[in-house]
Image: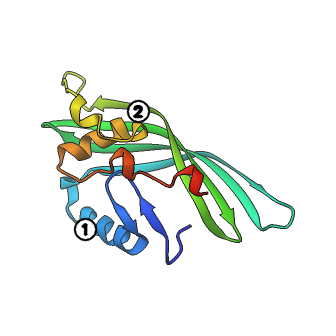
Amino acid sequence: MSFDDAYKATSWKQGNIDEFIEASMEDLAKGSGFMCILHRIIGASVDINPQLTRAVCKMTMTITCRFTFNKIEMDNEADYRFFFSLLEERVVFYTLQFDKHKFVPVNPEMVFHILEDEMEKCPSGFVKINEPSLNDGVKMLTSDQFGTSRESY
C-alpha cells in the first residue's frame, strides 16, 4: 500500500514511510513501555472506473490500543473509516473519519480523568485516541497540521 515516496501521518508520527518504519521499530523495541496497537479490518469496498485508471476505496476498521495511563491499564477502542483515491496505482488522496472512541479500564474499578485543555489542541477526530500519547509526552499533530486539505485535491 505504501510507495517509496509515501508520507505517513498518524496521531503519533508524521514523516516519510522510512521514518515511520524506523520509529515503529524503535517503539516496538521498548516492549511494554509503548502502547500496543491492534488494527482490525471490518470491511472494505473499491470502485474502479472502466479504464482501470482511477479508484476509490473505503475501508472500515477498529483500532485497539492497550497502554498505561496515569498508572491505570487501559484499552482505547476507536472505530473509523479510511478513504483512499487512487490514480494509476498511486494514492493521491487519503483521509480518515473517526466514528466512535471509548476508553475501557482493564480493571473496571479504576477511574481516569481526561485532560480537556490538552484535548482542545487536537484535531477533532483524534481527540480521544490522542489522549494516551499526550500523557506519554509524544508530540501530537495539532488541528492546523493534520492531513491534506480537500481543496488541494
Secondary structure type for disc 1:
helix
Q: Position of residue 134 (x, y in %)?
A: 22, 44
Q: What's the amino acid at mark 2?
A: His
Please tell me the numbered disc located at residue 104.
Answer: none
Q: Position of residue 106 (x, y in %)?
A: 26, 32
- Residue at 87% over, 62% down: 50
> Image quadrant for the N terminus?
bottom right
Write down the residue under mark 2.
101
Q: What's the amino acid at mark 1?
A: Glu
The residue positioned farthest toward the bottom in the image shown: 4
Number of marks present in the image shown: 2
The residue positioned farthest toward the front in the image shown: 151
Write down the residue under mark 1.
26
- Residue at 45% over, 50% down: 39
Contact, mark 2 vs mark 1 (Cβ under 8 Å): no
**Left or right of 60: which side holds 20?**
left
**Disc 2 or 1, which lies upstream in sequence?**
1
Quick one: 144 or 64, which is closer to the camera?
144
Q: Position of residue 5 (x, y in %)?
A: 49, 76
- Residue at 21% over, 59% down: 31
29 to 134, vertically: above or below: below
